[in-house]
Image (spheres, rainbow, N blue to C red):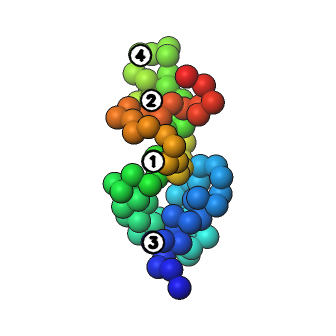
């Protein structure tokens, strides 16, 4: 039987879309802090990446740190083998830019 760590990776792979920390915590009945450590492990290994889906405020110039911009939940997605390595964060929309 695969470890919970492996099961978390398999769940994100099977989802086919970014998964939130809360979704996965409920699915595996784990605390968000414990699950976050598992996801961080897979990010370090290059198998997952965190997707920044928070909007940036263009009005005040403070970007995502604007107090009036809603904070979106942290989401994670699979890094596909056919994607070149990237040092810059993924764009907000995977279908644009």
Residue that badge 3 annotates: 5
Considering the numbered disc 2 on the image, is that residue within a helix, a strand or a loop?
loop
Q: Position of residue 46 (x, y in %)?
A: 39, 52
Relative to 53, say whether 34 is above or below.
below
> Residue visible at 36% across and 56% down?
45
Q: CA distance from mark 2 to mark 4?
A: 9 Å
> Residue visible at 48% across and 76% down?
4
Q: Quadrant of residue 23?
A: bottom right
Sequence order check: which comes first, mark 4 or mark 3?
3
CB under 8 Å between discs 3 and 2: no
Front one among 21 and 39? 39
CB under 8 Å between discs 4 and 3: no
Q: Residues within 10 Å of mark 1 (few under 14, many from 20)?
A: many
Residue 49 appears left or right of 7: left
Relative to 33, say whether 80 is above or below.
above
Q: CA distance from mark 4 to mark 3?
A: 40 Å
Residue that badge 1 annotates: 49
Q: Position of residue 53 (x, y in %)?
A: 54, 37
> Residue visible at 49% across and 40% down?
83
Q: Residues within 10 Å of mark 2 (few under 14, many from 20)?
A: some
CB under 8 Å between discs 3 and 1: no
Residue that badge 2 annotates: 64
Q: CA distance from mark 3 to mark 1?
A: 15 Å
Q: Residues within 10 Å of mark 4 (few under 14, many from 20)?
A: few
Q: Which mark is residue 61?
A: 4
Q: Residues within 10 Å of mark 3 (few under 14, many from 20)?
A: some
Front one among 94 and 22? 94
Q: Position of residue 74 (x, y in %)?
A: 50, 48
Mark toward the viewer: 1 or 4: 1
């Amino acid at each position: 039987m695969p470890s919970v760590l492996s099961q978390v990776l398999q769940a994100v792979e099977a989802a086919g879309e970014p998964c939130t920390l809360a979704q996965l915590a409920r699915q595996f009945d784990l605390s968000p802090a414990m699950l976050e450590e598992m996801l961080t492990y897979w990010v370090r290994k290059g198998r997952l990446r965190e997707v920044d889906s928070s909007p940036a405020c263009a009005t005040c110039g403070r970007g995502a740190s604007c107090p009036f911009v809603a904070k979106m939940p942290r989401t994670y997605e699979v890094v596909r083998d056919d994607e070149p390595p990237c040092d810059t964060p993924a764009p907000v929309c995977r279908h644009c830019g």
